[in-house]
Image: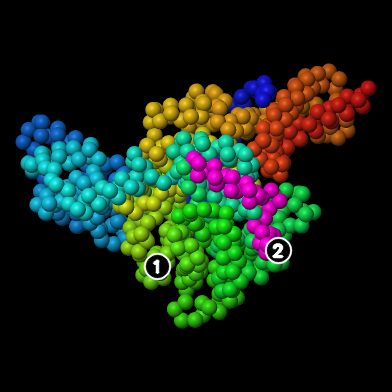
Amino acid sequence: MPQAAPLSPPGPGTATPGDSGRRCRREVPATNHSPRPSPSPSPRRVPAVGAAAAAVRPSRRPAALGAARRRPPLRSHRARRDRAMSSARLSRLPGESNRPPSRNASEKPAGALHYRAKVGAAQGPHRDRGAAAGQYRDAGAEGRGQAPYAGVPQRQAKAIDADRRCRGQPRARSQKQSRAERQHAAGMEASMEAGGPRRRLVHLDLKGAPPRASYLAEVLPLLRALGATGLLLEYEDTFPYAGPLEPLRAPHAYSPGEVRAVLSQARAQGLEAVPLVQTFGHMEVSAGRASSRFRRLGTLSRFVLKHKEFAHLREVKAFPNALNPHKEESRALVKAMVDQVMALHEDLKWFHIGCDEVYYLGEGEESKQWLQQQDNTPEKLCLSHIKAVASCVTSSYPTVTPIVWDDMLRGISEETLAESGVPQLVQPMIWDYAADLDVEGKVLLIEKYRRCGFSKVWFASAFKGATGVNQSLTLIGHHLKNHLQWLKVASNSPADVLEGIALTGWQRYDHFSVLCELLPVAIPSLAVCLQALKNGGYSEKIKENVEKLLGMSNLETETFMSTSLGTFPGSNILTLVTQVSFYLKSSVNELLERNRYVTGWFSPYHRKRKIIHPIIMHHFHPDAVSLLSKWNAVVQDLQAAMEQVFHKCTVEEWMEENVHPSLQKLQEVVDDLDKAIKAQN
């Protein structure tokens, strides 16, 4: 497709794609209680802690870590050197936290090097997990026939040996593995691949800018080549619901044939499908649909008007997001939705039932009456609904395991969770999209879930849609760091607990918000993140492989710019969106707000009265007409490219949000200039 001539980059102080609330910041702190990025602070959320705040955060590391440990005197310069090297390595191994050793650990005899599991000095005594968590055992483990270095990376094992030599202890000898250790090694191999999770699901958030089925068919082979093993399909209103559920179906919903075709193509690529249906919170899709008169206005309006058939099932009448868990009709609605989705999917192993961000739970009239009864709490109310939905899924589909977002479970006590029976029915998906997520905190959370009875957990990262509600370009560096942190969590957790990871790609923060980054724009970020997970890290060699798969000569992770177009599906959209995001607003503002001939001789006062100096107009009229012509050509190309991938309503929405405000300002100035010239004649 022909491209418009590239425009000059913005000058000093001009806007970048991060402006207008789209700066590179941590939109979703680790304490947020929703897998979706937070649109605004609320009582349930903690404001994001940015780099500036982190810089002044007091350190928890003591001045001399491990100073309380008694050590034998150094006998030579060589011993002193070896001791310093080993201490430097052991004081903070990769993945270790800043937390000082527990008192129990520091009271160990000097001859017993003992590393305990990271289960938090602040949340109770440490628990010894040994090889099951990839930790080191004490010297006495050798005498019990246990491998002291089971699951330990080679360079860390060498560091332990160096420390042993400084202490005058013999080097640990390899011994025959016990049966438990062999089982642990098998579990490690089953759940991890090259240092990363073996199951890697790409999340498709279809409640905004759903791609055409033809585009998905082009993308699936690329996803497989990049390292994806499955899809997490959040259909929302794009699923072809029928019968009594037909009101939930959007005008641009996929047809049953399109869904079957996409699933068949996914199976051909070796990608397993995991459907996601909201069954508790975020039920806006079930609460309203506009008439045909309003559907023509865009994709958002159908969630504004309430649908009378389902309005009575809300937890709170005024808000359409949460389902009333007390009504039998609510469960019947959920079962009908699940059954219709199941009918179009074959050989499913997992089914995601959502259950995140259940706002106003317990505030409905029926819930208030229920909570007045003895021993009833909002936590038990939440768990009872999750258990009911999960039981419905497992009883009707015994081979399918339900998955739930974990945010509603995090604050519930271990005793309440264990007694609810939920851990025996579902697998929690732990989410965090921050570039500096708390590794130790996630390990603690996994330990809590294990003690409650959950057999497996999932992780949820983000490759797009988590750095700004109206973000147009993807911050690859942010998302790469997020995935590298998740790899640390995986390496510090029991190997047999991780089922897989879902790389979320949110398209809207909720049904009422604007669009985040489009899928074609975020494919380079997805490629980098998938390859990092598949290979257990990111290196120059992996970067070269990503560039080869995407057809790019130089992929930048810390900036938005790239020197090559790329050959992946939708790469032309990325190029044109980059031009618009970087240069449209800045170039128009440069002409209209910083050109002295416009501000001095063609102000709003002059434009209203059609006053223009005949000589002055020649100083900016050609530039305004030329700039408008260039941008019209770029926008025309972008619109044509987007219509190959998205439905018309998506193209209209994106253009109205990202193009029309600046382009219309420029068009109005040119029109007023023409009118003023005619008035002078």
> In x, y percent, where is residue 230?
47, 45
- For residue 255, side relative to residue 435 (left or right): right
Q: Is residue 610 magenta?
A: no
In what element is the residue under mark 1?
A: helix
Give the residue at mark 2.
307
> In x, y percent, where is residue 611?
87, 28
**Image height check: is 465 above or below 382?**
above
Identify the residue shown where x is 8% and y is 38%: 74
Amino acid at dot 1: Leu
The quadrant of the picture occupied by the C terminus is top right
First in sequence: mark 1 or mark 2? 2
Q: Is residue 255 magenta?
A: yes
Give the residue at mark 1.
417
Residue 58 shows in the view: no
Residue 126 shows in the view: yes
Q: Which color mode does the image show?
A: rainbow
Mark number for residue 285?
none
Q: Image quarter for residue 542? A: top left
The quadrant of the picture occupied by the N terminus is top right
- For residue 162, side relative to residue 671 (left or right): left
> In x, y percent, where is residue 24?
52, 40
Region rendered in magenta: 241-269
- For residue 401, side relative to residue 647 (left or right): left
Amino acid at dot 2: His
> In x, y percent, where is residue 164?
12, 42
Identify the residue shown where x is 47% and y is 77%: 376
In what element is the residue under mark 2?
A: loop
Predominant SS along the magenta part: helix
Identify the residue shown where x is 63% and y is 59%: 284
Identify the residue shown where x is 23% and y is 36%: 155
